[in-house]
Image: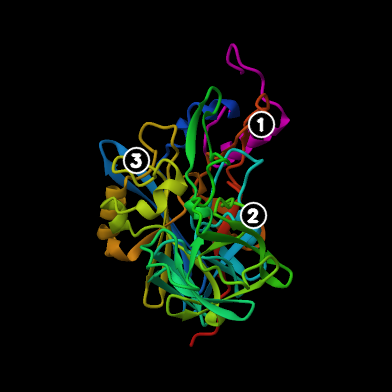
Amino acid sequence: MTAPGTQAPDREDQVAIAALHARGIQVTDIQALARSQAPFARRTTPWNRRLAPGVSLTARTAELGDGHFTNVFTLTIDLDRASCRAASSAAGFHLRDLVHGAALAAVSGTFSYISDDPAYQPAEACLDLACRDGNIASLPTATKPALLIHRGRPLVCTLVATGTLTAAGHTHPWTGSKDAQPPHRPGHLAVFGAANCRVRYRDDARTGFLRDVDPATNTTPRTHDALDCTVTPTTNGLKVTAVHPGGGADLFAGAFILRAHQPWPSHLTNGVPIHVTSIDTFQTQDLESALSLGPSVADAAANHTWAWDQSLGTSPFRPTARYARTLLALRGSQLRLQVLDGAPLTSTFQGATPQDTADLCTADGLDPAHVFHLDGGQTSKIAYSRDHQGPDVVGSLHYLRWPSPAEAPFRWRGLDGRLLRSALVITAPKEPR
């Protein structure tokens, strides 16, 4: 029966309600989920599923104190029996779409730019380093941990934001713009990108808030001696597609921006090809794919998160902030990907604080300094294969697509979730080594 003062659900909402009921989630009004997500605050029944030899997915509930709890979904991969790759796309994808063929599972990837303004988006939404199919898509602006698929194997390390590149055949050293800059030297370049943006939050009567950036201020700093070169991927590789004497380049216009100081190299002109040759101590020819990671669980608990905070808006690592979390740990040949689930519009199931997360890692026998954040919040999700039944998902089942235009209804998208720019994909077992 429809409650007084509400409209009967339309056909799409009826289908969504039936799908939720089939999962034991008792929802009667999809539109009401924009105000309360209480039906999702349910402790999971523990289970363990073997997806393939060397790949398993488990579920359990963890109590967090004061009545708070989270549901913990853990994907464990033996890298001697299965493979992991980092997938990223400027156009974006849904996680379930990656689970087909040899792919057994996929987990939401690292932090990307998110805004509620569709008219102003970055050309490359991945924040800091992204390498796809052996091609550099964006460079790091700050020293951060990163996941590299290096010579066919996953490697997690702190990647210093330095390296080398060539422009029209001339070699240049480069440094991330958020790191301490060396004195201006001829030929030395600084890297800017979408990770330099500052996300702002504004109140909204219907959705609660809107987040975006101010295009007028979303530029490189203006200074008379700087030459900023916007670098964009083309069918023939990276090229300079605009030059800005004096700075003021739009941070979202290309994959990244290279800044030179006077005397400006004469070959840094429009159309010049750019080839990144190294990042930190790694030769790019040895990288199949790569993504910058979020902070370690230990650093997040200690509030050492300056390199992420402005580009994420309201920091998800505030000491009292409860969010769903996605975590990555690599120990020897075992890769562990984990979701700590939560729905923000509940009283006891909003997710875990940074300290909660550190405590859970310690209880599982993991050093929080060697466990790293992937994108969390409403992005936290694992998709996995159910043999011939198609892919299923865990995490973020409360997710709603916000209305656009403003008068349109909210739509439940708990199975697809948010459009992602990066993910980790686990593929079918290999023969044991």
What's the distance in space between the residues labelled 2 and 1, CA to CA?
Answer: 25 Å
Name which residue type carries label 3.
Answer: Ala
Name which residue type carries label 1.
Answer: Asp
Name which residue type carries label 2.
Answer: Gly
Q: Which residue in the structure is indicated by mark 2? A: 92
Residue at left 34%, top 42%? 69
Residues 7 and 267: in front is 267
Residues 352 and 205: in front is 205
Q: Position of residue 156 (x, y in %)?
A: 41, 71
Q: Which residue in the structure is indicated by mark 3? A: 321
> Which dot, 2 or 1, sits closer to the camera?
2
Q: Which residue in the structure is indicated by mark 1? A: 13
Q: Give the range drawn in magenta.
A: 1-29
In the displayed orientation, state which residue is furthest to the top: 4
Identify the mark nearer the N-term, 2 or 3: 2
Mark 3 element type? loop
Marker disc for residue 385: none
Identify the mark nearer the N-term, 1 or 3: 1
Mark 2 element type? strand
Q: Where is residue 7 in the image (x, y as percent from the top left)?
A: 65, 18
